[in-house]
């Protein structure tokens, strides 16, 4: 990895002294992989459109982030990496880095310093959870519910997901174990501090699946974060999990009759990885884009479009109003004090180690 890191640092230092405009040594297009929906739209407005306007290049959007690990493994095996930059959750960044499928990054040499004068590594702080990870946002997986389908006592606690007597109707849950198994154990009496210790055992995993069994027939399983807001809008589910920014979009921008449950929200980081195996011209373009797209102002700009907290400390004071609605965005962030009274911080190291095994067990359980 040292050779790769040295090459990238040299590339970054070269780019720092040249213009990004029409550089003959940079590719003239990029394929950027993300999550689609309101989230990709926020990236388009904050990063992609301004960068394309400045450089004249083409950015092609791919919405395959939910399959990033499997697809990058296959591309690497085939020796044909067609993606230039990939948006992933923290645990997946660790896995891709450990497997040599993502490049290590010298954050201070290759990314812009903070607007407050801090180095990039100090500015990003604890969100740099891997040498390959370029943080972008703090987000949460949480639950939305139809305000007109929950009676006079709307849910206030996460365990409402499992309470089909008080809140009858279908639920929407992610077609993956992350968040589902933590909530299952929490609602089966396991203390929050003990969740991952229990989940690391065969008995704990069985306990989580047994709890999920109690609502299995009432669940619509989703693969893309945009599905739950649509299911809620259509009245097909009474409640469902998704990313907090997707719920914000449905509530604030689309004026849907949806409420958001912040209790036991699963806080996590999301950011970029650079795939291994890029040609020099593609790598140069990616690093030029990243220097621009992850600076203080650009990360603050994303919050104009979606309610995710910027990963840079220097960006937080610049978070202002929604770009179209004019409403203050800070109070809609998962990190706002009013929303974070009972958070559940996802242990990405656990998921980096156990994800493949639990994914396989989860899919086998679904098929039963």
Image (cartoon, grey):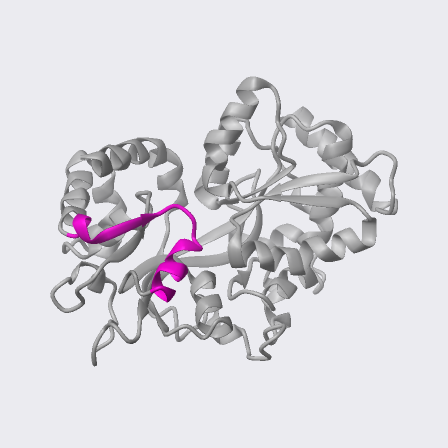
Name the quadrant containing residue 49: bottom right
The answer to whether 29 appears left or right of 126 in the picture is right
Residue at 54% of width from left, 26% of height from top?
100
The x and y percentages for residue 88 are: 51, 44
User: Which quadrant, please, contains the C terminus?
Assistant: top left
User: 109 and 14: which one is in front?
Assistant: 14
Residue at 34% of width from left, 70% of height from top?
341
The answer to whether 283 appears left or right of 18 in the picture is left
Check if residue 220 falls in the magenta segment. yes
The x and y percentages for residue 248 are: 46, 68
User: 67 and 312: which one is in front?
Assistant: 67
Name the quadrant containing residue 366: top left
Q: In this view, which residue lies farthest toward the top?
A: 78
Res. 119 in view: no
Residue at 49% of width from left, 67% of height from top?
249
The relative height of residue 338 versus residue 215 in the rendered view (above or below) is below
Residue bounds of the magenta highlight: 215-234
The answer to whether 251 appears left or right of 2 in the picture is left
Check if residue 366 falls in the magenta segment. no
The x and y percentages for residue 193 are: 25, 54
User: Which quadrant, please, contains the N terminus?
Assistant: top right
């Amino acid at each position: 990895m040292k050779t790769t890191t040295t090459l990238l640092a040299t590339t970054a230092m070269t780019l720092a002294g040249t213009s990004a405009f029409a550089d003959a040594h940079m590719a003239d297009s990029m394929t950027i992989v993300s999550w689609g929906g309101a989230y990709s739209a926020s990236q388009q407005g904050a990063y992609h459109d301004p960068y394309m306007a400045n450089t004249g290049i083409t950015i092609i959007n791919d919405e395959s982030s939910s399959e990033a690990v499997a697809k990058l493994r296959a591309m690497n095996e085939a020796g044909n990496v067609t993606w230039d930059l990939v948006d992933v959750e923290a645990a997946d960044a660790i896995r891709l880095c450990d497997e040599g499928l993502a490049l290590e990054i010298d954050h201070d040499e290759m990314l812009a310093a903070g607007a407050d004068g801090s180095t990039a590594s100090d500015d990003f702080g604890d969100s740099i959870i891997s040498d390959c990870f370029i943080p972008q946002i703090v987000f949460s997986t949480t639950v939305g519910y139809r305000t007109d389908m929950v009676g006079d006592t709307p849910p206030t606690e996460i365990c409402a997901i499992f309470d089909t007597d008080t809140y009858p109707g279908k639920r929407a849950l992610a077609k993956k174990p992350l968040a589902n198994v933590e909530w299952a154990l929490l609602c089966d009496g396991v203390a929050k501090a003990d969740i991952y210790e229990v989940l690391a055992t065969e008995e704990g995993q069985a306990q989580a699946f047994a709890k999920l069994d109690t609502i299995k027939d009432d669940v619509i399983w989703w693969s893309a974060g945009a599905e739950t807001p649509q299911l809620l809008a259509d009245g097909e589910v009474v409640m469902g999990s998704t990313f907090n920014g997707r719920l914000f979009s449905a509530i604030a921008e689309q004026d849907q009759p949806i409420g958001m449950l912040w209790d036991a929200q699963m806080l996590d980081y999301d950011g970029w990885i650079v795939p291994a195996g890029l040609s020099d011209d593609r790598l140069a373009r990616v690093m030029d884009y990243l220097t621009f797209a992850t600076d203080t102002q650009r990360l603050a700009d994303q919050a104009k479009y979606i309610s995710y907290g910027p990963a840079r400390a220097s960006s937080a004071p610049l978070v202002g109003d929604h770009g179209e609605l004019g409403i203050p965005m800070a109070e809609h962030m998962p990190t706002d004090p009013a929303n974070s009274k009972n958070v559940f911080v996802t242990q990405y190291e656990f998921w980096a180690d156990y994800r493949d095994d639990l994914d396989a067990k989860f899919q086998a359980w679904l098929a039963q």
